[in-house]
Image: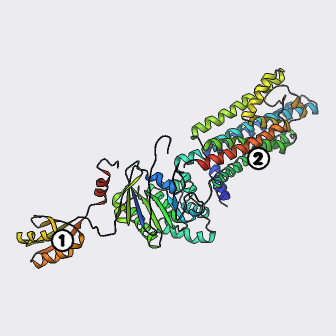
Amino acid sequence: MGTWIMAGVTFREAARKKILWTAFLAGSAFLALFGTGMHFQIKEFTRHSVPPFVRYQLEAAMLQVGYYAVDLLAVVMTILTSVDALSGEIASGTIQAIATKPISRWQVLMGKWMGFAGMVAAYVAAMVGGVTAAGYFIGGVLPHHSLRGASLVFLECLLVMTVTFACGTRFSTLTNGVIVLGLHGLAFMGGWIEQIGAVTDTPRLVTVGVVSSLIMPSESVWRRASFEMQSSFTRSLQFGPISNVSAPSAVMVAYAVVYLLVALIVAIYHFHQRDL
Amino acid sequence: MFGTKVAVSNLSLTVRRGEIFGFLGPNGAGKSTSIKMLLGLVKPSSGQAFVLGVPSDDVEVRRKIGFLPEDFRFYTWLTASELLRLHGRLCGMAAAHLRERVPALLDLMGLTPHRDKRLRDFSKGMLQRIGLAQALIHEPELIFLDEPTSGLDPMGRRLVRNVIRSQRDRGATVFLNSHILSEIEITCDRVVFIKEGEVVASHDLRAFPDEEVCLFARARNLSAETVAGLSHWSTSARLDGERLTLATHSISVFPDILRYLVASGSDVFEFRPERLSLEDLFLKIMGEDGGL
């Protein structure tokens, strides 16, 4: 019961953060831009009588660009909103009035985690849904396995959020933000290095990319999400943010899930052990 | 331990049920850390803390404990009523009970006109009062109050003082930590002084002191013989016009002295013990550089 009460109040707390609404505004602006771009692209295709198959594939590629942008927005929003979820309340002393109530610390943490997870789910649903709707109603294209892709984007955000929680039980808000953004940056760079390695057939680069994915698997989950949503044409693109020359396997997704669970256990353990 | 720094040491405290207990000590004596250990917020590196007979990290015992942290802060977007309902629900209270309890507590704290106001619009004193209300929402048996009157105006202090006494009167135990010694003196039944993590003195504020106590009297027609005759009860006597100051061994001799003065023909206008104030006692125990 205590977990659900904490989840409810945390969801309301998270939903009031300016950064969330700024991210929604940025997302809405992006969706408007995306829809407008797609609209004019369709007009151009019609004017130049582009064959339907080619046209469909190009629009599907643009759809992937849209997903790439909202994924980036969702990850950044997730980190910025959850970075002070624990460290901020510990530093301000707000947590003391809660931690002395008859609920366990793990319930407090899980309630907060669930509240933020609900907020992230709503954001991902709105943004991925917005791109999908724009693609369908303006361009007439739908992604392959849209639900699977959206679920993986949510998993990526949840993973980043859980690492933020784990670090938040030990470090100050600022240090936490630097660590998590640094880890995601590492994963991002690792993903690109792996792609370059695959294109240029350089096994050592691929290994570096895989190792970085093991350190922080968030980017791998995005690349798997992108792979799931892509058409065969966009999959065949050799290089770029939406290409997947070396798509992460289902094992890497399973690794990300295990990573998330371990991060959650670490967060609960540290929060239980630390002084408040 | 905090790193290499020892926080508190061989502290050993017993608080009686149903009393208002004052916890005194200079800055850095370990008061806040001790309270946090009793509430399970800080884990002792060695030793044990028991609250209401069970280890302090027991979650269930917290149903019987209320806590007002120093400088109470909470989500500022909540209204006063929402805050109390949230804390009541966290304490496992039923919605029906909360519908009665929340307005009653807001009324007790003088916050009824502000029940729908968000905490961000509250003054420091109002925040302190709503913080006290959240500590009392579930009618706890033991209430820890860390600086409950800081930031309050005289009316607010009186209100909080009355609330604390009403809690004692319903049978609750109040554990009070405050730097405002005058508040402690008029509110607490007993105080304990700690220094560098050790209990150095305990003082019952409601009992007649057996130790040496001064008497102040204002009287007319005091003859030199009458003053000399006071040596039977006092170790020293000083007369300055109508003002008489005596050092006695015990407050129990006061009625005899008063009878003696009246019988010897003096007109007595004022007659009262001059005890050491708590502040004097604090400085005496801690030393002038006690750290306050």
Q: Position of residue A212 (x, y in %)?
A: 73, 30
Q: Position of residue A54 (x, y in %)?
A: 91, 30
Q: Residue at x 22, y 69 (%)?
A: B272
Q: Position of residue A216 (x, y in %)?
A: 72, 35
* Residue B190 appears left or right of A85: left
Are discs 2 and 1 located on one and the same chain?
Answer: no
Report the residue marked by disc 1: B270
On residue A125, the disc is 2
How many badges with numbers are in the image? 2
Answer whether residue A191 is visible to the viewer in this image.
no
Between A227 and A169, the one lying in front of the other is A169
Q: At label 1, which amino acid type do we have?
A: Glu
| Furthest residue in direction bottom, as rendered | B263
- Quarter assignment of residue B168: bottom left
Task: State which chain disc 1 sits on.
Answer: B
Between B106 and B198, the one lying in front of the other is B198
